[in-house]
Each structure stands twice: as structure tokens, then as C-alpha cells.
Image: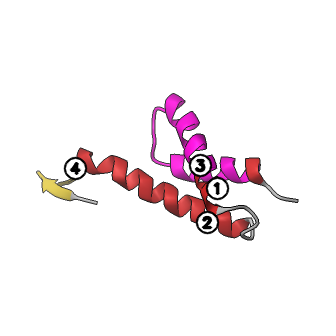
Amino acid sequence: MTAERLEGHLVRDPRTLHTDIEVQLDQAAEEVSRRLGGKIDYQVVRVAVSEAYQRLADKAKFHNFLPILAARSAQRSLHVT
């Protein structure tokens, strides 16, 4: 994450926000894959997380916790019994 201080406040470079989200979604997909015991291919999990994120992001006013919520949503939809 690229950030700088402006009048004592930490300011993130908006050009890196998309990259930061992709890294967070990768990490979320890895966690979901681990929780599912590797029974579902990582790429399938990653797509499910991305789609869940997009659904949530389209309606969200605040995006801070969306990667976590997307991971939970994807895990529920992919749950293996």
C-alpha cells in the first residue's frame, strides 16, 4: 500500500486501491479454500469470492469489510457436506 502523510493524516494513493482489493480477495479466497479443506479448486473459490464481492460492492456505501463479507458469502455458497 502506498501512503503518505498530509497534514498529519495518512492518505492512501487511490491508484493502488484496486490492487489492494485484489490482494485482499486473494487472501480471502485462500482462507475459504483452507476452511473447505481444499475440496474445491482454488480458482473456483477465487471466482466465487470475486463475484460475491462485486454483488456486495454494487450496493455498499462503505467498502472496508467487503472482502471479509465476500469470503463468508462465497464459503456459504460453496459449502461442501
**Which numbered dot is residue 13?**
4
Of residues 34 and 4, the one nearer the viewer is 34
- Magenta-drawn segment: 47-76
State the image coordinates of residue 66 (x, y, percent, origin top left).
Answer: 52, 46
Check the picture and name the quadrant holding the N terminus. Answer: bottom left
Mark 1, residue position: 45
Residue farthest to the right, as pictured? 81
**Looking at the image, is mark 4 or mark 3 earlier in the sequence?**
4
- Residue kind at label 1, given as amino acid type: Val
Mark 2, residue position: 31
State the image coordinates of residue 3 (x, y, percent, origin top left).
Answer: 21, 57
For label 4, count other residues whose C-alpha is less than 10 Å away and answer few (under 14), some (14-19) or many (20+): few
The answer to whether residue 8 is visible is no
Check the picture and name the quadrant holding the C terminus. Answer: bottom right
Question: Depth-wise, is mark 3 or mark 2 nearer the camera?
Answer: 3
Q: How far is disc 4 from disc 2 in space, using C-alphas? A: 27 Å
Check contact, mark 3 vs mark 1: CB within 8 A: yes
Residue farthest to the left, as pictured? 7
Q: How far is disc 4 from disc 3 in space, using C-alphas? A: 26 Å
Q: Residue at x 58, y 41 (%)?
A: 51
Q: Secondary structure at mark 2?
A: helix
